[in-house]
Image: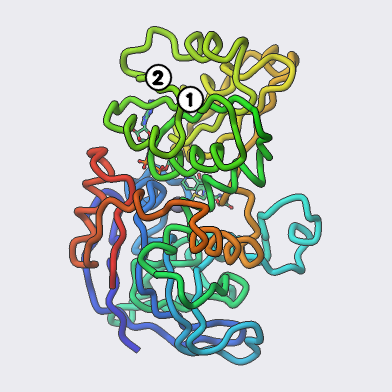
């Protein structure tokens, strides 16, 4: 079949909207009509050329929601008309990683996914016979996609696609990092570096679990009002503070119980660790830093009890946890609507990237 998609032909170039050939689902695969997709900073990171796994030409996008149109042979858990969210972190429930119960990082299709291919090591997308690569196993900047059954979360059918697409990455990443990775407890002091599409979800989850002080750090003062609405109690403007770490330590009587880095900058990752309380403070790295970047700190920071951790997709097990997060949204426990600041047709997707870069948007959502 044919599908309309935004193509990333090379790093740094704007996306172009084209008609693409899409092969149907093979064994264990599902054809999905994407109804809406968010634009995450990671799409920009890969498009910019900073991602060592970035390969072109590809169809980016990993924050979508849509409807099952057809299923390939052997698909058991999904059928036509089911509403789904594609998962860049699948959940096969059979690999060593899934069975460990210690991580959400299912590895059953990770190697082909990282090469822009389906599990049989081929692409379903092409233009005039030239293969176009998949991205993060999802490619939600295409109106129709083919994905493995294990990379789809089935969700309730009354949830609006133009909101729950954000659960495909940003909401789950931020909320999950608080609930599943850090397991923040009531009364904890929390610091969030970067008040964008991820950081604001960390803030709303910190409030949800009853955190005490919720301190936000950003260079953009325009982020303060939105962050306060979501639960931030104190704001530090990183462009005017003389020393962000000292400011946090004095606000928290010795340091944060938990900090979350939601920027992708190794300098702020160090600050996020070093603002943690001696003996127990944990810093969670969420931001994705450019290829070649490295983090550093004095090992003494760790010897004296601070803990450095990472979180991918919020530690969420996609097929199990994503449907629950959709329920939380539908029950009014989490706010997604106010974070979606812009809505665009696919033809204007490059404007969505510009709005992110200029700091004007929190999330832009493309509606098909
Ligand atoms: P965003 O662009 O919406 O937000 C980034 C925020 O950081 C902005 O408010 C910006 O003003 C602020 N900022 C930038 N530089 C800063 C600095 N030096 N000091 C203080 N604030 C600064 O991006 P996003 O969509 O929220 O993504 C944030 C990061 O998380 C990105 O690196 C993205 O790739 C990563 N990410 C990781 C995961 C994961 O699973 N680990 C999932 C999604 C996104
Ligand atoms: N390809 C990059 C790494 C990118 C990365 O860390 N991705 C996150 C999700 S970001 C979503 O917005 C992730 O889930 N990582 C785990 C994984 O297996 O990729 C690089 O630096 O090579
Ligand atoms: Zn993302």
Give x and y (percent) for residue 260: 54, 32
Give the spatial CA distance, label 1 vs label 2. Answer: 7 Å
Q: Residue 262: image x %, image y %?
A: 47, 36
Query: Foreground: 226 or 20?
Result: 226
Q: Say which quadrant the N terminus sits in.
A: bottom left
Q: Is residue 121 visible?
A: no
Left or right of 103? Residue 36 is left
**Image spot of residue 305 (x, y percent):** 74, 18
Q: Quadrant of residue 281?
A: top right
Asked whether 93 or 192 is in front, the reply is 192
Q: Is residue 225 above or below residue 35?
A: above
Element at label 1 = strand
Residue identifier under label 2: 236
Residue in the image at 68% along x and 16% along y: 299
Q: Is residue 132 left or right of residue 322?
A: left
Q: Disc 1 marks which residue? A: 215
Q: Residue at x 66, y 27 (%)?
A: 282
Q: Callout 2: 10 Å neighbours few (<14), some, many (20+)?
A: some
Would you say the residues marked 1 and 2 are in contact, meaning their CB atoms lie under 8 Å apart? yes
Residue at image location 43% in from the left, 58% down from the top: 166
């Amino acid at each position: 079949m044919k599908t309309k998609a935004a193509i990333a032909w090379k790093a740094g170039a704007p996306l172009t909207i084209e008609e693409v050939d899409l092969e149907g689902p093979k064994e264990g695969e599902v054809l999905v009509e994407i109804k809406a997709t968010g634009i995450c900073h990671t799409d920009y990171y890969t498009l910019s050329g900073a991602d060592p796994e970035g390969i072109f030409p590809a169809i980016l996008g990993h924050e979508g929601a849509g409807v099952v149109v057809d299923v390939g042979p052997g698909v058991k858990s999904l059928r036509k008309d089911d509403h789904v969210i594609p998962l860049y972190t699948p959940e096969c429930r059979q690999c060593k990683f899934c069975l460990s119960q210690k991580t959400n990082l299912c590895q059953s299709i990770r190697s082909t996914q990282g090469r822009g291919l389906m599990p049989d090591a081929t692409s379903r997308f092409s233009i005039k016979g030239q293969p176009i690569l998949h991205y993060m196993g999802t490619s939600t900047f295409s109106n129709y996609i083919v994905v493995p059954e294990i990379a789809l979360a089935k969700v309730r059918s009354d949830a609006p696609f133009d909101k729950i697409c954000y659960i495909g990455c940003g909401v789950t990443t931020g909320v999950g990092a608080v609930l599943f990775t850090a397991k923040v407890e009531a009364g904890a002091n929390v610091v969030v570096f970067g008040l964008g599409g991820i950081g604001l979800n960390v803030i709303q989850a910190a409030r949800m679990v009853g955190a005490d002080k919720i301190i936000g750090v950003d260079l953009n003062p325009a982020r303060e009002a939105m962050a306060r609405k979501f639960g931030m109690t104190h704001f530090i403007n990183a462009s005017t503070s003389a020393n962000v770490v000292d400011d946090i330590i004095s606000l928290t009587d010795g340091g944060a119980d938990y900090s979350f880095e939601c920027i992708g900058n190794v300098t702020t990752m160090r600050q996020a660790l070093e603002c943690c309380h001696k003996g127990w403070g944990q810093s969670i790295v969420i931001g994705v830093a450019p290829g070649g970047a490295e983090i550093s700190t004095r090992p003494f920071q760790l010897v004296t009890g601070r803990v450095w951790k990472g979180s991918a997709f919020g530690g969420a097990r996609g097929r199990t946890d994503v449907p629950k997060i959709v329920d939380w949204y539908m029950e009014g426990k989490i706010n997604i609507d106010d974070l979606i600041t812009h809505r665009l047709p696919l033809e204007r997707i490059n404007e969505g990237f510009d709005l992110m870069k200029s700091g004007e948007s929190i999330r832009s959502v493309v509606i098909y």
